Image (spheres, helix red, strand yellow):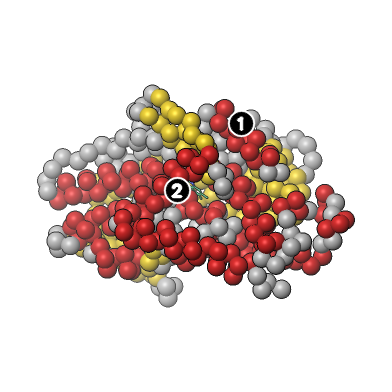
Amino acid sequence: MKKIIIIGGGAGGLELATDLGDKLGKSNKAQITLIDKNSYHLWKPLLHEVATGVLDEQVDNIYYSSQGQDHCFGFTQGTFTDIDRDNKLVKIIDNNNETTSLAYDFLVIAIGSTSNDFGTPGVKEHCIFLDDQNAAISLRETLISKFTSFCSIIDESETKDEDKIRIAIVGGGATGVELASELPHMVETFGACGRNKMCSDLLDVSVIEATDRILPALPEKTAESITQTLQKRGIHVLTKTMITKAESDGFYPKEGDEIKADIMIWTAGVKAPDFLKEIAGLESSRSNQLVVKPTLQTTRDDSIFVIGDCAYAMQDNGHASPPTAQAAHQMAKVCYENIVNLFNNQPMKSFKYSDKGTIISLHDTAQGVVKLGSKSEMSVKGFLALMIHRLLYRTHQASLLGIFKTIRFASASKVMYKAKASSIFTNRD
Ligand SMILES: Cc1cc2nc3c(=O)[nH]c(=O)nc-3n(C[C@H](O)[C@H](O)[C@H](O)COP(=O)(O)OP(=O)(O)OC[C@H]3O[C@@H](n4cnc5c(N)ncnc54)[C@H](O)[C@@H]3O)c2cc1C
């Protein structure tokens, strides 16, 4: 029986493992194995909600082993480190810190991306990155511990600007903006959980962007409107501010004074993990992504497919597809069809990225554009936009769990949020 290994159970990899398990695993045509360094999946676009306590990661996660049992694929927990292409082996470090090799006939690499500090001095040492669920949980703990110690010293009648909790977020893309918009709400919830001295006025949040506006993927008018929404919530939006250095107490811009900060977060861009660069002699891009043909096979090895953020898939417009969950989902579908077609000696399909639009969630509202075909688009704002944003996640969940389980998850999420908020924000002295 042919062996298919998928490395990375994220937005793209878990959908692919589920579909291939249902199609080829169930009928014993192939042995499908998913490898991930974590034991459970959490959709990455939700990380800012985990970091701010809006979402309960224990309700919204999916354990790989139980998903594998339901969908006929095996799961091995381990960290992928290398490939031996001559012998068709992948190397992983398992939970006991031992290196193991697993044999494959077809390999799919779907390990996503990590934050890119662009070599800026001090960023690695002093900033928090929102790269995975562990980082999101650790950011939440850092924020709560800061709020808790702040509570014990604050005298609200005398709070001056310099007494506030300063949070600086570098990067005005979707991640930075969505995270910033949740922070005032997080503090209000913290205050409502018995810390009544705490309110969003005690926060000083800045979103720092090097170019002349935030959210370059959105039309200028929409980005301007989102800037105003952030400003109304007391969030500073600093554009044309290129950060050249980070130190323990703040960021240094190319021009002007140091931007002081108690908590420093870096969301200024992504790259594929460094170890992927030319791994096993495969072709890679400047940001370490593995270059793929339109079939999503690597340019130098037809038995290796790459999908999601770590794939460099050039499109007809001369740009590579973007590192988004939307692209990872579309790649997973094409990769699935191509592997099934390979088994059936059918021709393979070409991956063509289709941009369906971008919606930014701003806690209790959202804003963005929905693409209507290749030429026109519609602006959406408010409740409708928020519903479309929520639907994106529920669609991902439905493709993994089916409609009925997704409805159960959605209801549990709503109920659990209140319990979660009071359990994570109380008893912290
Ligand atoms: C806060 C935030 C908000 C976002 N919002 C949106 C949005 O609204 N819309 C949108 O389209 N995109 C959004 N994105 C981007 C989106 O999350 C990613 O583009 C998408 O998750 C990429 O999917 P992927 O399958 O390539 O990788 P991921 O979903 O990142 O999955 C990678 C998987 O590989 C595993 N892994 C990594 N390294 C190894 C290793 N060495 N060995 C074994 N396993 C490994 C990880 O544990 C993970 O499970 C957002 C991202 C963030 C951080």
Q: Position of residue 259 (x, y in %)?
A: 75, 45
Q: Is residue 74 left or right of residue 286?
A: left
How many numbered discs?
2
Q: Amino acid at mark 2?
A: Arg
Q: Position of residue 331 (x, y in %)?
A: 32, 44
**Secondary structure found at label 1:** helix
Residue highlighted by disc 2: 390
Res 283 quadrant in image:
top left
Q: Is residue 161 left or right of residue 221?
A: right
**Secondary structure found at label 2:** helix
Residue sitting nearer the eye, 161 or 391: 391
Task: Say which residue appears at 53% left-offset and 62% top-offset.
Answer: 417
Check the image and name the residue furthest to the left: 345
Check the image and name the residue furthest to the right: 158
Q: What mark, if any, has residue 295 been given in the picture? A: none
Q: Position of residue 310 (x, y in %)?
A: 41, 47
Q: Is residue 119 left or right of residue 248?
A: left
Quarter of the picture holding the N terminus: bottom left
Image height of 350 relative to 60, above or below: above
Task: Say which residue appears at 79% left-offset and 40% top-offset.
Answer: 257
State which mark lies toward you, 2 or 1: 2
Residue highlighted by disc 1: 224
Image height of 353 relative to 289, above or below: above
Residue sitting nearer the eye, 263 or 300: 263
Q: How far is the residue under mark 2 from the one under mark 1?
A: 23 Å
Q: Which mark sits nearer the N-terminus, 2 or 1?
A: 1
Task: Say which residue appears at 88% left-offset and 56% top-offset.
Answer: 158
